[in-house]
Image: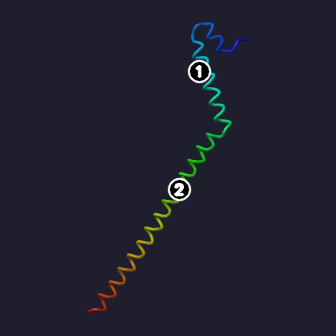
């Protein structure tokens, strides 16, 4: 039994150039799959997500600390105002 590509070529629905291009694309895709390029891309995405999460956690921590310092400053100013009079 002839391959689908050969059948399409005989029927005149494709050309030799398109057949070669399809084979080349298939080889490239398989090579990338074997080399782990796709794995590296998912690893990079994971690193980006981890960095974004760490950045968000740091920002939340900094905001909480800033709020605490502002409260301490407000309490300190309140103390000075009450003791001044």
Question: Which numbered circle lies on residue 42?
Answer: none
**23 or 46, which lies in front?**
23
Task: Look at the numbered disc 2 and give the secondary structure of its residue.
Answer: helix
Task: Look at the numbered disc 1 and give the secondary structure of its residue.
Answer: helix
Real-space Cα separation, disc 2 to disc 1, in angstroms: 40 Å
Residue 54 x %, y %: 52, 60
Q: Are marks 2 and 1 in contact (CB under 8 Å)?
A: no
User: What residue do we see at 63% from left, 35% from top?
Assistant: 32
Question: Which numbered circle lies on residue 51?
Answer: 2
Residue ID for mark 1: 21
**58 or 77, which lies in front?**
58
Question: In the figure, residue 75 lies in which quadrant?
Answer: bottom left
Residue 8 x %, y %: 61, 11
**85 or 46, which lies in front?**
46
Mark 2 vs mark 1: in front: 1
Compared to residue 82, the image places residue 35 above or below, namely: above
Dot 1 alpha-carbon crowd within 10 angstroms: few under 14, some 14 to 19, many 20 or more: few
Q: Which color scheme does this rendered protein use?
A: rainbow
Residue 30 x %, y %: 66, 31
Question: In the figure, residue 14 lies in which quadrant?
Answer: top right
User: What residue do we see at 60% from left, 13% from top?
Assistant: 16
Dot 2 alpha-carbon crowd within 10 angstroms: few under 14, some 14 to 19, many 20 or more: few
User: What residue do we see at 40% from left, 80% from top?
Assistant: 72
Compared to residue 4, the image places residue 53 above or below, namely: below
Quadrant of the image containing the C terminus: bottom left
Relative placement, left or right, of 75 versus 60 is left
Residue 82 x %, y %: 30, 89
Compared to residue 84, the image places residue 42 above or below, namely: above
């Amino acid at each position: 039994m002839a391959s689908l590509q050969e059948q399409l070529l005989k029927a005149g629905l494709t050309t030799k150039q398109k057949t070669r291009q399809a084979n080349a694309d298939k080889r490239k895709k398989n090579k990338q799959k074997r080399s782990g390029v796709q794995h590296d891309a998912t690893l990079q995405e994971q690193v980006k997500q981890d960095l974004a999460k760490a950045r968000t956690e740091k920002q939340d921590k900094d905001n909480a600390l800033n709020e605490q310092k502002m409260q301490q400053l407000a309490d300190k100013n309140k103390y000075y105002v009450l003791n001044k009079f």
